[in-house]
């Protein structure tokens, strides 16, 4: 049996009376990249947000079923959501650095978690920038505003900010969709390098990107998980006809 980091069982999600996810069950292995694919509105971003309870911020949202991370049901009443989001970081589609210095962006999470010594913060910022393949570009500019960086650099600041609290899982919602091809390639290289340290779940509309960066793929359609397999198998021998049609560009 392969180890499972995240175990999802019979997950249903409703926005009011509208069911957005239907009986989703899958297991995500540690230190792998899992790509969530499917056409717009299929439920992949909604599913991603269930993994760190971001949907809790929507009043009409209701969830049934279980999601366990390391054997703990993250929807249990006694779960500390702040601690969960430290363990399960997130990077969004649009880079969203704070209007602060590069240093203060990356030190933000550690400071909230009680790190106050400058030497310790300096080390965290440096190591997070190194992990995000950003250090050589910003090491002499740490006191400059993160807003002044290029789009690709801003996104890597956001990744460094997420990594600064040592998460075990990183959720990425189309992290390169607003970036040019060169910046996109850097983000993809970074994802490949990070998986030795962290479990990554990425939403992408880009089939080529999914094929390049992921170990496993999950194909969603109309709120259902149609197929979940190794990336190689999904792109060469998909089981479901709907998966084959999507991958071959017949719809979506």
Image: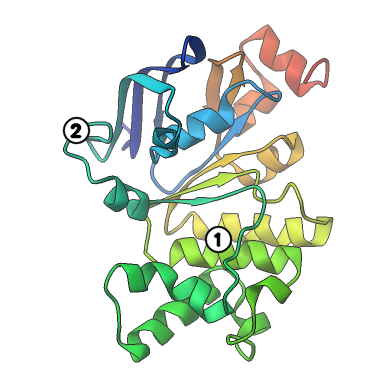
Residue at 83%, 15% (x, y): give it.
250
Residue at 29%, 67% (x, y): give it.
113
Q: Is residue 128 visible?
A: no
Q: Give the label on residue 223, or none.
A: none
User: Which residue is labeled 2 in the image?
Assistant: 77
Viewer-closest of 30 and 168: 168
User: Which residue is labeled 1 in the image?
Assistant: 193
Q: Position of residue 229 (x, y in %)?
A: 53, 25
Along the horizontal axis of the image, is 113 left or right of 27? left
Q: Given this view, does label 2 or label 1 mark the residue nearer the observer?
A: 2
Q: Position of residue 114 (x, y in %)?
A: 26, 73
Along the horizontal axis of the image, is 47 left or right of 250? left
Mark toward the start of the polypeptide (2 vs 1): 2
Quadrant holding the C terminus = top right
- In the current view of this chain or complex, which residue is farthest to the left? 78
Q: Quadrant of residue 249?
A: top right
Disc 2 and disc 1: Cα gap in Å? 35 Å
């Amino acid at each position: 049996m392969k180890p499972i980091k995240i175990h999802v069982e019979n997950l249903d999600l409703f926005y009011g009376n509208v069911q957005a996810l239907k009986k989703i069950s899958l297991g995500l292995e540690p230190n792998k990249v899992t790509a969530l694919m499917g056409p717009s509105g299929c439920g992949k971003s909604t599913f991603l947000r269930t993994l760190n309870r971001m949907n809790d911020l929507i009043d009409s949202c209701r969830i049934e079923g279980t999601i366990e991370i390391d054997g703990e049901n993250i929807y249990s009443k006694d779960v500390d959501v702040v601690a969960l989001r430290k363990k399960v970081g997130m990077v969004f589609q649009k880079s969203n650095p704070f209007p602060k210095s590069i240093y203060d962006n990356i030190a933000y999470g550690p400071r909230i978690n009680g790190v106050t010594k400058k030497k310790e913060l300096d080390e965290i910022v440096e190591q997070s920038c190194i992990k995000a393949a950003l250090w050589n570009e910003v090491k002499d500019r740490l006191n400059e505003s993160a807003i002044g960086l290029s789009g690709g650099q801003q996104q890597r600041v956001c990744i460094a900010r997420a990594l600064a609290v040592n998460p075990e899982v990183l959720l990425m919602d189309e992290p390169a969709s607003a970036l040019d091809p060169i910046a996109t390639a850097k983000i993809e290289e970074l994802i490949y390098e990070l998986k030795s340290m962290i479990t990554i779940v990425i939403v992408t509309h880009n089939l080529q990107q999914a094929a390049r960066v992921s170990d496993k793929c999950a194909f969603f359609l109309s709120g259902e998980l149609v197929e979940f397999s190794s990336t190689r198998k999904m792109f060469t021998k998909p089981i479901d006809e709907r998966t084959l049609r999507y991958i071959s560009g017949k719809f979506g």
